């Protein structure tokens, strides 16, 4: 006989309720993956709405109705964006108009030039011109399709921007109602504990957006002064473009630097080299000094948390992830701080008693 004890069987029972919960969770995950673009748009709208919420809240405290206050804030923000676009596009449009007005003179100079006359008088020039015109005519349908595709994409982007604007506006107007509705499902003690956390989260998201704008202003000032020092055309326009692009963490500053160096090349090679050096140095200063300092003061995020959240979110979700990284990191810090407060208090009491 063997001295080994008999084997014990362990029976694992999974209830129907547990299976239903798992299936529901899997369905929600699948739905989220299929509609990731829509969810990202909703997240961006939520960040914009929560970022503007403190401003609207101050107007409400002064006697404004929340709907009127939200619409007023959005109109002011939209007006500021339109002014920036006009400041940027105005000089560029003037240059386009000047170029079109000068085209007849360019054509006259070309047709009167010795090289053009020699080409016309060369044998077979008529055949060459006819072939060029045929190639141009055969390429017109493809060119028209490309133009229509670009126009359709631009129109789709405009509709998406309008949808995002109204979604943010409605969220901003209804934010207190949504908060009250959610806390209506919780006991009073839970509401007393977590409602201040919600307000702190809103303030943290708003502070993160203000910090992002502050960093963009610094980038615009550096770009504008550099463009002016190197004699680049339209330094104010270049500063505005840099500031707008710098709103996109990590990626935007690089794109702005490429534009600045390209414009500097039209002036001189030394100017382009100097602009490249300044932008390389500034990007390192912004990413590893200005960025952490501003966000540490604005939302109390450490330098490591700020950089790590941007890198991780940017890798997972691209540009949108980089934009949403810091606001969500600030919100999560507020929530986790409150969630872990009881345990930290118990651990502190145990250390004092030991």
Image (spheres, helix red, strand yellow):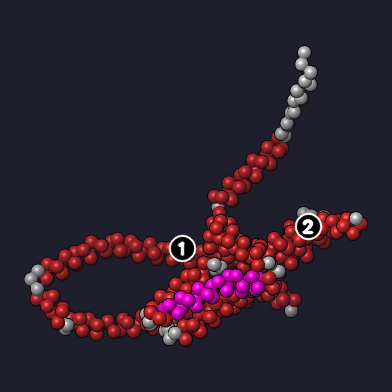
- Number of other residues with Cα within 10 Å of mark 2, as a class: few under 14, some 14 to 19, many 20 or more: few
Report the residue marked by disc 2.
340
Q: Identify which residue is drawn at 74% across, 67% down.
A: 200
| 331 in relation to 242, above or below | above
Q: Identify which residue is drawn at 87% across, 57% down.
A: 351
In which quadrant is the N terminus drawn? top right
Q: Position of residue 205 (x, y in %)?
A: 67, 67
| Image depth: mark 2 or mark 1 in front | 2
278 in magenta: yes
Q: Nearer the viewer, residue 204 or 342?
A: 342
The majority secondary structure of the magenta stretch comes to helix
Q: CA distance from mark 2 to mark 1?
A: 45 Å
Q: Identify which residue is drawn at 78% across, 65% down.
A: 196
Judged from the image, the secondary structure of the residue bearing numbered disc 1 is helix
Report the residue marked by disc 1.
156
136 in magenta: no
Picture quarter containing residue 101?
Answer: bottom left
Residue 220: image tag: none
Q: Compare marks 2 and 1 and give the one earlier in the sequence.
A: 1
Q: What's the magenta region?
A: 272-295
Q: Position of residue 207 (x, y in %)?
A: 67, 71
Picture quarter containing residue 16?
Answer: top right
Q: Work out whether residue 321 can be spotted.
A: no
Q: Position of residue 224 (x, y in %)?
A: 50, 82
């Amino acid at each position: 006989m063997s001295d080994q004890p008999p084997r014990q069987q362990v029976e694992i029972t999974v209830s129907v309720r547990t299976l239903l919960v798992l299936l529901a969770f899997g369905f929600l995950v699948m739905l989220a993956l299929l509609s990731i673009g829509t969810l990202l748009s909703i997240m961006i709208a939520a960040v914009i709405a929560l970022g503007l919420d403190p401003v609207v809240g101050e107007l409400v405290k002064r006697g404004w109705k929340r709907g009127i206050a939200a619409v007023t804030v959005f109109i002011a923000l939209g007006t500021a964006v339109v002014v920036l676009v006009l400041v940027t596009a105005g000089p560029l449009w003037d240059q386009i108009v000047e170029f079109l007005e000068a085209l007849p003179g360019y054509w006259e100079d070309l047709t009167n030039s010795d090289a053009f006359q020699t080409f016309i008088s060369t044998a077979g020039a008529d055949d060459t011109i006819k072939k060029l015109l045929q190639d141009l005519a055969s390429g017109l349908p493809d060119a028209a399709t490309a133009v229509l595709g670009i126009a359709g994409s631009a129109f789709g982007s405009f509709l998406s921007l309008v949808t995002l604007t109204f979604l943010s506006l409605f969220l901003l107007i209804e934010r207190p109602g949504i908060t009250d509705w959610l806390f209506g499902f919780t006991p009073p003690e839970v509401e007393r504990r977590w409602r201040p956390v919600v307000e702190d989260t809103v303030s943290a998201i708003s502070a993160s957006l203000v910090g992002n704008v502050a960093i963009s202003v610094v980038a615009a000032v550096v770009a504008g002064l550099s463009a002016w020092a190197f004699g680049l055309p339209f330094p104010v326009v270049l500063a505005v473009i840099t500031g707008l692009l710098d709103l996109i963490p990590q990626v935007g500053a690089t794109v702005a630097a490429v534009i600045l160096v390209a414009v500097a090349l039209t002036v001189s090679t030394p100017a382009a080299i100097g602009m490249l050096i300044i932008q390389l140095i500034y990007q390192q200063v912004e990413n590893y000094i200005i960025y952490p300092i501003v966000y540490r003061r604005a939302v109390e995020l450490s330098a490591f948390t700020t950089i790590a959240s941007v890198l991780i979110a940017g890798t997972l979700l691209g540009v949108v992830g980089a934009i949403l990284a810091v606001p969500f990191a600030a919100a999560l810090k507020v929530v986790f701080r409150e969630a872990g407060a009881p345990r930290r208090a118990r651990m502190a009491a145990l250390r004092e008693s030991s």
